[in-house]
Amino acid sequence: MRKNKTTHIVAGILLPLFVIAFIVLTGRFMYIQATGVVDGVSLDEWAKQKRTSSYPLHAERGKIYDNNGMTLAYDRPIFRMYAIVDKKHSEKSDTPRHVTNPEKTAESIAKVLEVETDDILTPLQNGIENERFQVEFGSIANELSQQQRDEILELKLPGINFEKDSIRYYPNGMFASHIIGFARETEVQNEEGIKNEITGIAGIENEMNDILGGKNGFISYQRDKYNNRLLNPNEIIQEPENGNDVYLTLDQKIQTLVEDVLTEVDEEYNPKRLTAVVMNPKTGEVLAMSSRPSYNPNNPANVENWYNDAVSTPFEPGSTMKMFTWAAAIEEGVYNGSEGFQSGSYRVNEKIVPIHDHNNGKGWGTISYDEGFERSSNVAAAKLVWEKLGADKYLEYLHAFDFDKKTGIDLPGEVAGHILYNWPLEKITTSFGQGTTLTPIQQMKAATAIANNGKMLQPYVIQKIVDSTSGDIIEEKSPNVVGEPISKETAKQVLSLLEATVTSEDGTSGRYELQDYSVGGKSGTAQIPNPKGGYLTGKENYIFSFLGMAPIDNPQLMMYVSVQQPELEATETGSMPVSFIFTNVMENALHYLNIDPDKDSEDTVNLVEIPTLKNQKATDIAKNLTDQGATVTTIGNGSKIVSSNVQEGDKVLPQERIMLVTDKPTMPNIIGWSVRDTLELAGLLKLQTEILGNGFAVTQNIKEGTPIKENDYLGIEFKIPTIQDEKPTDTTENPEDENGNE
């Protein structure tokens, strides 16, 4: 009786609880059925998401080109490999759609990717054992090239699939890296949430990121659990918007000249810094700009210097400053080139330390101011400012040459120098480039006034912006005159003085003479401040530089070179690495631009004139050009010429490689070719090119004689050869030192 009573009591308690639970659950189910919402989530939308596949359609980032349309940066397609290992994926298919033979699959893929078989086999076996639908292979298969993907597809291995992606690629490797910069995939917050997008990190890639970057699209469709489209998939496609293209003023051939020579000097002299800038002084267009240390934007690891020294690193310029000091004196009408002065040393008064000429203050006796410029006399510069011009008037010219402001070049990170002009000694030393600091690009901008009849031009590197879809020009730059600090007559007189420093027996820049072109310029030996006070001492502790232009009567090219603290042997001077860079680049660049030589010399090179090429017999044209002394490479064994890297009427140097592409192109032997020639070949044949290293080709993936077609993949490895050139032993030239040391 007691038990029954207890049972009734418990039942009386539980029954209402069960009734309440039943009512709650039933009400919940009825609510869900009526509304289709659970915890604020629509079941219908949730189901759609679960059975809907959505993939991004990546926008192509705009390309970066040189001034001739050669590609400097583009989105290169890459492929991620994955394998489906679930047998159920093949149930509704006549052919296997999953990996049926893991051992054979792994062995075949490993050969293509040049990895161990276990690197492929282990993930496959683990996926099968754990009953996974698909497996991936990590870093070894995340960035496959199109060639690797095609080779694997040719093996017809069931279950092996690829997903296409892209990375930013720079076909020239370490090439104008501080200008172009680099872009890479980063997490970006946008209206769709956090997404991975290719974003500019440095250089033009960063500066023009909004222009280059496009807008991704997407594709979505409904599928079954095996990822197969439904018969009515409700497909939605949002097309991507590609980025716009940016054309630079850089010329790939001249830039390659600069890169090759800088690399050679860097290897030979191991300087702390190297900088070179080539500009068209008539327009302000920068045709080449490079620095060392540099980096490969395809793999920007362990970068020693992120700064573009040409625009971001001011330093005391040294005697290159004298061309502007003389220009100011001439323009102001206080200059008499034949007037004599006592060289050696100069002291304004007892309170100011004396100024010394660079031959230990010995000087050359009484010489003219013209000769003072040729000999790079500090005393002459000091006397011009202090006694002829006056310090206040000289300051006006410093401002007129814009030495107190940035140039406004369209590159990130520009830093202006500083005019140090507080005390009398600072005003005097500024005249020969000590104390006051300038960047190379500030000096180049000011020098355009000398090369361009008094008109000073703003330097720029972005030529135009082009719609990548339509080809329409969105924006295009043109030369911009930003000042006229001197007259045409003054500019001509300064050009004459600059030429004398190269050609005169007393000139300090004889090493910079060109073979076929008259050249003028001014060398500099800038002291480096010592953190402990004063300046560093020693033969190597200077920034050796040269600013020159040619042909001197009407300069078409202007170049600035600086080499900081090179490792010199006992017989070497600081001007040796500087002149090696300047003369090699300028001589070849002027010929490449078809600037007529203005020097009559028995050693003048006979240029090769190009006849009509297209549809001509390849063997006849090759013989004709070879007989003229040209270096000719015939591409293929066809009978007719279909294209070439030169055109009818061109005049080229004998050592410049002429490529004749026949109607049956085959791969030539390019071992020993330069990067420039190799890229020219790839452009002619429209090959997908991948370059590793710098210097000259040592390997090629396409064998000589192999028939080639458009979009074939060409991979080449380059290495820098050991310098074999004999070093000069002439020790008669002393480096200029504004502090009075040889």
Image: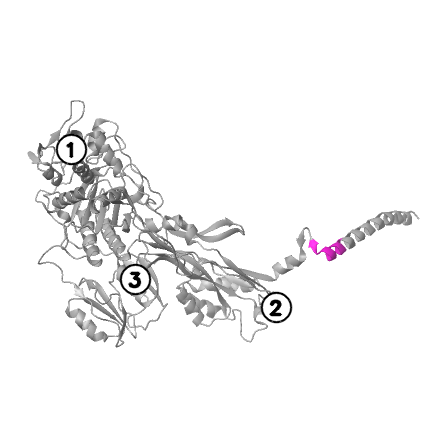
> N-terminal of the two: label 3 or label 1?
1
| Position above or below: 126 against 704 | above
Specify the quadrant that holds the C terminus: top left
What separation in Å lies between label 3 and label 1 (alpha carbons)? 51 Å
Q: Secondary structure at mark 1?
A: helix
What separation in Å lies between label 2 and label 1 (alpha carbons)? 88 Å
- In this view, the residue farthest toward the left is 365
Residue 393 quadrant: top left
As for residue 90 lying within the magenta part, the answer is: no
Q: Residue at x 56, y 67 (%)?
A: 86
Q: Residue at x 48, y 55 (%)?
A: 215
What separation in Å lies between label 2 and label 3 (alpha carbons)? 48 Å
Q: Which mark is residue 679?
A: 3
Q: Position of residue 131 (x, y in %)?
A: 57, 63
Disc 2 crowd, CA 10 A, few/some/many (<14, 14-19, 20+): few
Q: Position of residue 322 (x, y in %)?
A: 18, 38
Residue carrying label 1 = 384
Residue 67 quadrant: bottom left
Disc 3 crowd, CA 10 A, few/some/many (<14, 14-19, 20+): many
> N-terminal of the two: label 2 or label 3?
2
In the image, 535 versus 159, the foreground residue is 535
Observer able to see residue 714 = yes
Q: Amino acid at mark 2?
A: Asn
Q: Amino acid at mark 3?
A: Leu
Q: Which mark is residue 232?
A: 2
Query: Which dot, 3 or 1, sits closer to the camera?
Result: 1
> N-terminal of the two: label 2 or label 1?
2
Q: Position of residue 340 (x, y in %)?
A: 8, 34
In the image, 144 versus 138, the foreground residue is 144
